[in-house]
Amino acid sequence: MLRGLTTVAYQAADLDAARAWYTEVLGIEPYFTRTEYVEFRVGDYEHEFGILDSKYLPDLSADSTSGDQTAGAPGGAIVYWHVDDARAAYDRLIELGASPHQPPRDFGENFVGAAVIDPFGNVLGIMTNPHYLEVLDRR
């Protein structure tokens, strides 16, 4: 059923600021730009990384069945992007204005992961992942 990462989409209330920040983080310009959305192709497999202007999202600030107020809190799954050095990448993201979410930690067998909250409220996971490199070497 799940065959691989296709597109990761974040959201931002200030799309222009998010575009500029991620252009700096990634070192490339988006390849696709619309009024409400920008998208980058990143990494060895050119995975799609998009940012949607949050004004196009439905209002999910209150769950109609439970009354749960969740607006503004990071949540959901953490998507980890492979990086060559998770600790150095974490430090760079913090220097660029991200907030700590999960400091770098060793998951064992040379898997090191961390996560930050970008300036727009999204969780950005990074991981040094030996398996990723093994797959890349086989290609």
Image (cartoon, rainbow, N blue to C red):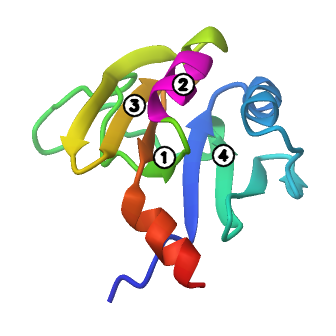
| First reached walking from the N terminus: tag 1 or tag 3 | 1
Residue 24 as seen in the image, left or right of residue 59? right
- Nearest to the observer: residue 130 or residue 59: 130
Crowd band around label 3 with a 10 angstrom C-alpha radius: few (<14), some (14–19), many (20+): many
Mark 1 vs mark 3, foreground winner is 3
Quarter of the image with the C terminus is: bottom right
Using the rendered view, name the quadrant where residue 12 is placed: top right
Query: Quick check: marks 4 and 3 in contact, CB under 8 Å?
Result: no
In space, the residues marked 3 and 2 are separated at their CA atoms by 12 Å
Residue located beneath label 4 in the image? 52
Task: Inspect this view and state whether residue 18 appears.
Answer: yes
Mark 4 vs mark 3, foreground winner is 3
- Nearest to the observer: residue 97 or residue 17: 97
Residue located beneath label 1 in the image? 58
| First reached walking from the N terminus: tag 4 or tag 3 | 4
- Secondary structure at badge 4 equals strand
Q: Which stretch appears magenta?
A: 86-93
In space, the residues marked 1 and 2 are separated at their CA atoms by 36 Å
Mark 3 vs mark 2, foreground winner is 2
Where residue 2 sits in the image (x, y, percent)? 36, 82
- Secondary structure at badge 1 equals loop
Residue located beneath label 2 in the image? 88
Residue located beneath label 3 in the image? 115
Crowd band around label 1 with a 10 angstrom C-alpha radius: few (<14), some (14–19), many (20+): few
Mark 4 vs mark 2, foreground winner is 2
Question: Is residue 91 part of the magenta span, yes or no?
Answer: yes
In space, the residues marked 4 and 2 are separated at their CA atoms by 27 Å
| First reached walking from the N terminus: tag 1 or tag 2 | 1
Give, as a three-letter code, the residue at label 2: Ala
